[in-house]
């Protein structure tokens, strides 16, 4: 299996963004991964991260998840899922950074992931799904200028209430 590595350019802009890298999660990373899920707003593939057991977290993380490293320190997780046919070029990105990560990191992490993906794959549509209860995630998606495509209402429970998922996307022109 190949490992995706995201590296910032040698001369980083003065944005305060770290040098990003990513790797598949290994058993030695699970203390850090479990710590992420102990944060009440680490909404990586779940609306209730701090209530998940260790086996549920391992299932959520899965083989497709990459550990994001900011200057070689664990900072979050991301995973990419394909939609449609094998050559549809439509994907959904799951991305979450730890609570202590500054807002500027979210932008730089997203752009580094997109840069790596477009180097390896043709992208037509990259979707991001955010719970209506997730203020930080909604602010992040909206600040990226992603197209807000709509809300699938009342599909998840969070804090004892029903919420929907808001769908955002970036769309690229077809190249072939």
Image (cartoon, helix red, strand yellow):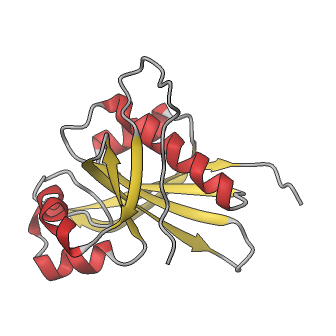
- Residue 124 placement (x, y as % from top left): 72, 57
* Residue at x 30% of width, y 72% of height: 61
Q: In this image, 168 relative to 97: left or right?
A: right
Of 72 and 144, which appears nearest the observer? 72
Residue 47 falls in which quadrant of the image? bottom left
- Residue, far front: 10
Q: In this image, 5 relative to 175: left or right?
A: left
Q: Is residue 169 visible?
A: no
- Residue 159 placement (x, y as % from top left): 14, 59
* Residue at x 30% of width, y 67% of height: 156
Q: Is residue 68 visible?
A: yes
Q: Is residue 16 above or below residue 166?
A: above
Q: Looking at the rendering, in which quadrant would you find the C terminus?
A: bottom right
* Residue at x 31% of width, y 39% of height: 71
- Residue 60 placement (x, y as % from top left): 29, 74
Of 96 and 133, which appears nearest the observer? 96
Q: In this image, 166 relative to 146: left or right?
A: left
* Residue at x 51% of width, y 43% of height: 112
């Amino acid at each position: 299996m190949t490992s995706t590595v995201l590296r910032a350019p040698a001369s980083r802009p003065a944005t305060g963004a770290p040098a990003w890298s990513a790797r598949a999660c290994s058993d030695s990373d699970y203390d850090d991964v479990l710590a992420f899920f102990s944060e009440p707003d680490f909404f990586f593939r779940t609306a209730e991260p701090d209530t998940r057991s260790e086996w549920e977290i391992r299932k959520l993380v899965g083989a497709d998840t990459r550990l994001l490293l900011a200057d070689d320190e664990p900072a979050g997780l991301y995973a990419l899922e394909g939609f449609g046919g094998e050559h549809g070029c439509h994907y959904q990105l799951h991305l979450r950074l730890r609570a202590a990560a500054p807002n500027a990191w979210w932008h730089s992490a997203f752009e580094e992931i997109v840069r790596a993906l477009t180097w390896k794959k043709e992208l037509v549509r990259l979707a991001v799904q955010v719970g209506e209860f997730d203020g930080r995630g909604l602010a992040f998606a909206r600040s990226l200028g992603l197209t807000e495509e709509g809300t699938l209402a009342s599909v998840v429970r969070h804090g004892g209430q029903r919420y929907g998922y808001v769908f955002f996307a970036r769309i690229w022109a077809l190249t072939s």
